[in-house]
Amino acid sequence: MKVLVTGATGFLGSHIVDQSLAAGDEVRVLARPTSDLGYLNSLQDVEIVHGDLGDAQSLAAACKGVDVVHHSAGRVEETGSRSQFWEANVAGTRRLVDAARAAGAGRFVYVSSPSVATEYDEDRFGIDESEPYVRNPKSYYVETKAIAEREVLAANGPDFTTCALRPRMIWGPRSGGWMTLLLRKIRSGRLPDLSGGKQVLVSITYCDHAATACVQAARSDNVAGKAYFLADAEDVDLWGFARDLATAFDLTPPTRTIPKPVLDAALTVFDTIWKIPGLQERVAPPLSSWTVAALTVSNTYDTTAAQRDFGYSPTVSLQEGMDRYVEWVESIGGLPALLA
């Protein structure tokens, strides 16, 4: 098939390119003229089309002649205004859906997030796709991703198959997201152990698993108009993972604790201050109630639907994935280069 990948200069998008090529697909990517094309330029047979989600004309050109659109681009930053998140995650997705449908693409695979259907209000295990969308999104990211996912699934039709994949905490080589942030905080000593002495079990998704799922879903006749949770085969003790990550790079694992009354008081202050107009657009709070919930509440996901409908089968173990990640960090110059 001929596929278009958005977000290909980013973490997951680059792995979707890898897995599409491995599957024998003809790959085209959409990239801003200012994007770093270093990795993509190292690959053979990848067509690069310049444009962005705000330019409908460039999207029409990018979608011309493709069979499948893998849409992994979007705004995931900790900061930004609601209008910025809306433009990137909702308006941009709308333009791409319109362009893909007008160009005759038969498939649209949207990379969503499990946060669109996770309240983080209590420990939950084995969450499946019957879970409703969040009632009160705690961030612009969650709000706009949920709206975009609903619209993508609603666009499904007889000649235009759409689906949404929800990988949790994507990790692995070339990661520039939560793992880098976690390592930066561990190295600085600014990350307290917020576990409260309990095991916080979470689902995470190795990059190859998420990317392969995109390729599999694009080939399935069972995904029309559906959303799917993705996760690795192993549930992970989040704070144990943080300790293992620290040990792998000879860092001191988080040990400092914060008494719950002190933490609750600090969150109240931060959540109040960061409601000041304009502040959250420029600076991320040291902690927020949403971030703390994600670090202290167990949430795991059932991937039975993905296994049933398109053969999802994670094969990389936690240890193998960690070894690959450490090897990649060393290959780019080690921790100083990663965190520079």
Image (spheres, rainbow, N blue to C red):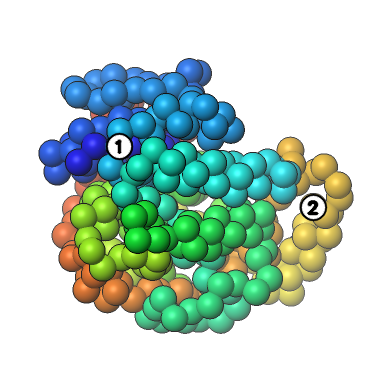
Badge 1, how many Cα within 10 Å: few under 14, some, many 20+? many
**Secondary-structure class at tag 2:** loop
Q: Give the residue at x 55% y 55%.
A: 148
Is residue 3 rendered to the left or right of residue 294?
left
Query: Are there few (<14), some (14-19), or many (20+) residues within 10 Å of tag 2?
Result: some
State whether residue 152 is above or below residue 248: below
Question: Where is residue 219, by image quadrant?
Answer: bottom left
> Considering only vertical position in the picture, is 119 above or below 182?
below
| Badge 1 or badge 2: first in the primary sequence | 1
Horizontal side of residue 162 vs 113, given as left or right: left
The front one of 248 and 294 is 294
Q: Residue at x 47, y 58 (%)?
A: 155
Nearer to us: label 1 or label 2: 1
How far across and down, in percent of the image, does residue 295 sit?
53, 65
- The quarter of the picture where the N terminus appears is top left
Which amino acid does the dot numbered 1 rest on? Val
- Residue 180 appears in the figure: no
- Marking on residue 193: none
The residue tagged 2 is 274
Q: Nearer the viewer, residue 168 or 211?
A: 211
The x, y position of residue 275, in whole percent, is 82, 54
Residue annotated with mark 1: 66
Q: Position of residue 178 (x, y in %)?
A: 47, 49
Image position of 332 with respect to 219: above or below: above
Q: Residue at x 39, y 23 (%)?
A: 49
